[in-house]
């Protein structure tokens, strides 16, 4: 009996993905557990295994296809010699019906298409239906191209981006640039309107991958919907630097080296225990308060960032945190983290000190209640207890707080606890092993 393979949900936040690569071909025999495809989610490229055995009778979604919604049919596995016409047709119709849609498409919104542009799912003059990808529909609309006049080169004759680009390239006259005074502001403008502003200037159009689109969407939503407020402190870290140097000396024979960021993670974890009202997340009108300190750490990767989570960080030694963080960061840069390794937590740490940044404000990573921005330590003159100016190493931090779940006084106590732990670092390493 034929089995329809559907786009899997490979992470808790996944709504759609890119079918990056097929690892088998039509007609290949597969067994349960065999790798079928590589699927790119919003955070990682993950391998997808077969759960049934048989022949890969039909591939319904071509590799490289982006925006494939979960549960969309992507392939059919059958027994050898089995007739597939009915199953394949039904699954193909199902796949087409679940194809990604573009919310701003006037056709999807029930509005008439612009003059001269045939909607992507309209009929041709011969009565045959037009199928086109959402990106192709948008490009056709923006450039006033009639889809009915194109022949698709995508799977099963689907009109795709390259078909639109070929039509644009074949036009005898290029699109004229608008006079500077008539060019609309970029905010909310369609792609072609912005592109025309740079007509005649050498440039490259870079399509956003799933991760960059997700980062853009989440941070835009966070900045627009989360009522941020900011608490700033300067921390004297001379004692921490001295302790770190001594501990690294002891650990040198084990080829272990602790970073300042490892201590920051531990200090935040312990501060969350001391001020449990700050160990919270926002959950659609309600607040979730946690027992353990699960701390997320922003890791820059090509094209975006991950926030892997150190679970139960308050109960770990700085050596354990350092080893776990190195492993998570390395696999994050390879996009090989498992979803459970970057989901969760209540507070994020974003450290740009290694890039020479002295201070900055970070955007909260929803649903977290706060994020700590850590700057570079710098030598500065400070007054000691006797009123004398002496040199000291100061590190600037800014705590961005979600006012829906953390009030100013709670945020101040949380940050004060963190500062005390960093300035008295022996409190952090009492359980060093």
Image: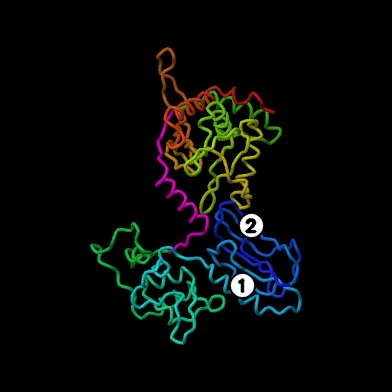
**Quadrant position of residue 173:** bottom left
The question of residue 268 being in magenta is answered with no
Q: Secondary structure at mark 1?
A: helix
Residue located 50% across and 26% down the image: 419
Q: Quadrant of the N terminus?
A: bottom right
Measured as percent of width and height from the top left, residue 254 is found at 71, 34
Q: Quadrant of the C terminus?
A: top right
| Residue 30 vertical position relative to residue 306 in the rendered view, above or below | below
Q: Secondary structure at mark 2?
A: strand
Residues in magenta, as a range: 205-233
Would you say 159 lies left or right of 336 here? Answer: left
Name the residue carrying label 2: 46
Q: CA distance from mark 2 to mark 1?
A: 24 Å
Residue 91 marker? 1
Residue at the left extreme, as displayed: 181
Depth check: give the residue in front, 385 or 36: 36
């Amino acid at each position: 009996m034929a089995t329809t393979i559907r786009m899997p949900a490979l992470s808790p936040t996944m709504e759609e993905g890119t079918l990056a690569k097929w690892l088998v071909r039509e007609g290949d025999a597969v067994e349960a557990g065999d790798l079928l495809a590589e699927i790119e989610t919003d955070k990682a490229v993950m391998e997808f295994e077969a759960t049934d055995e048989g022949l890969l009778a039909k591939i319904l979604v071509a590799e490289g296809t982006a925006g494939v919604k979960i549960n969309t049919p992507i392939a059919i596995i059958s027994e050898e010699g089995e007739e597939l016409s009915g199953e394949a047709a039904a699954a193909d119709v199902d796949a087409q019906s679940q194809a990604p849609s573009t919310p701003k498409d006037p056709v999807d919104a029930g509005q008439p298409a612009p003059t001269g542009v045939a909607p992507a799912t309209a009929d041709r003059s011969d009565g045959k239906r037009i199928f086109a990808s959402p990106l192709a529909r948008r490009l056709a609309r923006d450039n006033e191209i009639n889809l009915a006049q194109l022949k698709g080169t995508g799977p099963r004759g689907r009109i795709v981006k390259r078909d639109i680009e070929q039509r644009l390239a074949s036009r005898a006259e290029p699109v004229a640039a608008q006079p500077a005074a008539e060019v609309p502001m970029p905010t909310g403008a369609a792609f072609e309107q912005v592109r025309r502003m740079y007509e005649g200037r050498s440039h490259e159009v870079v399509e956003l991958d799933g991760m960059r689109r997700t980062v853009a969407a989440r941070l835009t939503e966070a900045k627009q919907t989360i009522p941020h407020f900011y608490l700033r402190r300067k921390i004297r870290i001379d004692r921490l630097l001295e302790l770190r140097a001594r501990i690294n000396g002891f650990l040198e024979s084990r080829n272990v080296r602790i970073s300042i960021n490892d201590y920051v993670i531990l200090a935040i974890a312990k501060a969350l225990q001391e001020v449990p009202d700050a160990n919270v997340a926002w959950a659609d009108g309600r607040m979730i308060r946690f027992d353990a300190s699960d701390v997320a750490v922003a890791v820059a990767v090509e094209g975006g960032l991950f926030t892997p989570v150190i679970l139960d960080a308050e109960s770990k030694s700085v050596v354990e945190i350092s080893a776990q963080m190195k492993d998570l960061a390395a696999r994050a840069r390879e996009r090989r983290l498992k979803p459970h390794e970057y989901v969760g937590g209540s507070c994020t740490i974003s450290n740009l000190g290694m890039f020479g940044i002295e201070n900055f404000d970070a955007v909260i990573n929803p649903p977290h209640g706060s994020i700590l921005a850590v700057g570079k330590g710098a030598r500065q003159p400070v007054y000691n207890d006797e009123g004398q100016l002496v040199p000291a190493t100061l590190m600037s931090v800014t705590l961005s707080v979600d006012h829906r779940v953390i009030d100013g006084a709670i945020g101040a106590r949380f940050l004060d606890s963190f500062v005390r732990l960093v300035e008295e670092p022996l409190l952090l390493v009492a359980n060093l092993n």
